Image (tube, rainbow, N blue to C red):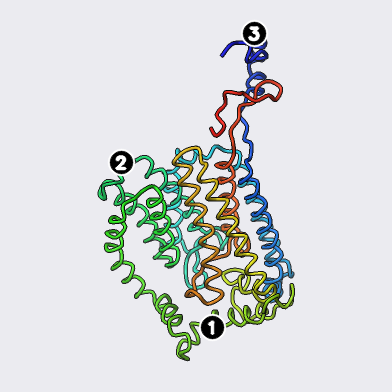
Amino acid sequence: MTSATFPRVAQRSVSGAEPRAAAAQNRVRWRIDAEARLLVVVTGALLAFGLATLYSASAFKSMEMGRGSAYFLLRQLTGAGAGVVAFAIAAKTDAEGWRRHAWFLMGLAIAGMLVTVLPFTRGIAPPILGSRRYLIGGSVQPSEFAKLAVVIWTAMMVVKKGERMRRFSKGMLPIALVTGLLCVLAALEPDMSVVLFFGLQMMLIVFAAGGRIGHFVLLGLLSAPVVWEKAQRLQYVMQRVMGFADAANAAHAKVNYQLTQSLIAVGSGGLFGVGFGEGRQQNGYLPLSYDDFIGSSIGEEWGFVGIAGVVLLFAAWAWLGFRIARKARSEFQQLVAIGLTVTLVLTAYLHVGVVIGLLPTTGLTLPFISYGRSNLILSMLTTGILVNIGSTRERVVGAGATDPLASPRG
């Protein structure tokens, strides 16, 4: 490359202050590609719809608590604001940098979940609805952050190990042990849905990287007795499974109460719903109608069309996420994009499956829509990371021209 390529740099390199000006003009910027732009549009639509739905679904509960009707909405707006900041930072930060901080993120996730189960930390991690999943009065949920840590850390380990992933003892086993520690902490909270989710995330990324099927079978055989024994100890897990399997049995009426009220809500909505703000089940009949069962409120007020619209929006989110993964700048970023896409969209579809009675009751929220600032911030951060992976890195030279030698994707 000749000196004529950077005329301003060559002319201003005489003084001590001028190189800094030259560096500012010769910088790297991110150009958001089409898939990433569409992902932002879909995310914005889900977030806007979610805020409106949350207000309608939570107004009765807010007033029942002696608060204004917009209490939960205003709290969610603070999470949305923080989420937008997290999105903006992640979208402008090279996603490859997450690889260097993978161990720190995993350590932070383990520490956060450990605090929720220690016997002397009840002051900052009190039991809520029978489990200790939150910190600081319900403001922070470490398991949500841990989902991000599992994806990034597992992707880093898979890429680092390379061909050693072909050996169970050198590849799959060390990754499973660390992820298993998180699973143990989640089981102690207790939160068995998160336990299964951590394991699913880990296996998905290993599989996407070319993991051997035999290793998954062996890992499943080793872990199945432990999972089954823990599930039997947690009576609520077995009750929900048995209640779902034999829903017509009157003996399971109590454990199936949420599911029954959810089906009443969805059935009442019909094709087009009863109208925004006109839902009745959220007026004290359906517990957590603004959180774990907000999909029921959508079904009642917006009907089949509303639920189908949400399903299609998340399908579009998944399609864009996988297209971004296909064009990723490195193997690490590709695995991260796959892991984050499946994590968010699978959570959404499991939520919808629960509220319409296709799956046993679990405590999974609907991303961008359910009440919960930790989940909302994580969802926005996830979107920001995918937007960066789906962006083109360019070098800006001089007064805005781009370097023709800069790599189109990194």
Q: Which of marks 3 and 2 is nearer the N terminus?
A: 3
Q: Earlier in the sequence, mark 1 or mark 3?
A: 3
* Residue occupying the far top of the picture: 14
Q: Mark 2 points at which residue?
A: 163
Residue at horizontal 55 percent and vertical 29 percent from the top: 407
Q: In this view, does 168 lie above or below 407?
A: below
Res. 257 mark: 1
The percent position of residue 171, horizontal first and vertical second, equals: 30, 47
Q: In this view, does 318 lie above or below 101?
A: below
- Please tell me how crowded label 3 is: few (under 14), some (14-19), or many (20+) other residues with Cα within 10 Å: few
Q: Secondary structure beneath disc 3? A: loop
The percent position of residue 257, horizontal first and vertical second, equals: 54, 83
The percent position of residue 301, horizontal first and vertical second, equals: 70, 74
Q: Quadrant of residue 317?
A: bottom right
Residue at horizontal 58 percent and vertical 51 percent from the top: 320
Amino acid on which disc 1 is placed = Tyr
Contact flag, marks 3 and 2 (Cβ < 8 Å): no
Q: Mark 3 points at which residue?
A: 14
Amino acid on which disc 3 is placed = Val
Task: Judge depth for marks 2 and 1 and give the one in front.
Answer: 2
Report the Cα–Cα distance between label 3 and label 2: 50 Å
Q: Secondary structure beneath disc 1? A: helix
Q: Earlier in the sequence, mark 2 or mark 1?
A: 2
Amino acid on which disc 2 is placed = Glu
Residue at horizontal 57 percent and vertical 42 percent from the top: 390
Q: In this view, does 378 lie above or below 267?
A: above
In front here: 242 or 123? 242
